[in-house]
Image (spheres, rainbow, N blue to C red):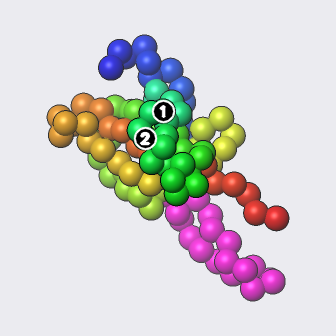
Amino acid sequence: MEIGDLRHRITLQKKATTTVNENGFEVKTWEDVKTVWAAASNLHGREYYAAAAVQAENTVKFTIRYTEGIDPSMRILFKGKQYDITAIDNIKYQNRYMEIKALEVVGSG
């Protein structure tokens, strides 16, 4: 991994609260945890076909410097879009870089 590959800004968020609005629907609020530099790429090859098999066409792979406290309950903001974290890999358990696979959240309605 070249340090110059980490050229995109992403924001990691965690769920702050869940409330019920006047119509009886749950509304989640999110809180920024950290903004970091990341390399972002679409899946290709075997990863792409594995994701396509479960209709996860909008999966993006983010590589960031190792950061403690990131878990799959969080989400990522990138270029105005929201991504739910689906997998986190501490690459080779070296605590240097993390690979995060995330699925784009498509708004409903």
20 sits left or right of 96 in the view: right
Residue 100: give x, y in percent of width and height. 41, 43
Q: Is residue 33 magenta?
A: no
**Residue 18 x %, y %:** 59, 74
22 displayed left or right of 5: right
**Magenta stretch: dominant SS?**
strand
Q: Is residue 30 above or below residue 42?
A: below
Residue drawn at the location 43% of the way across and 41% of the way down:
47
Residue span colored magenta? 12-31
Q: Report x, y in % for residue 76.
A: 53, 46
In this rendering, does residue 103 appear at all? no
The amino acid type of the residue labelled 2 equals Glu
* Residue 30 located within the stretch drawn in magenta: yes
Identity, as a three-letter code, of the amino acid under mark 1: His
Asked whether disc 1 touches disc 2, contact meaning CB atoms under 8 Å apart, the reply is yes
Cα distance, mark 1 to mark 2? 6 Å
- Circle count: 2
> Residue placed at 36% from the left, 38% from the top?
99
Q: Is residue 28 above or below residue 5?
A: below
Q: Which mark is residue 47?
A: 2
Q: Which residue in the protein does label 1 denote?
A: 44
User: Which quarter shows the N terminus?
Assistant: top left
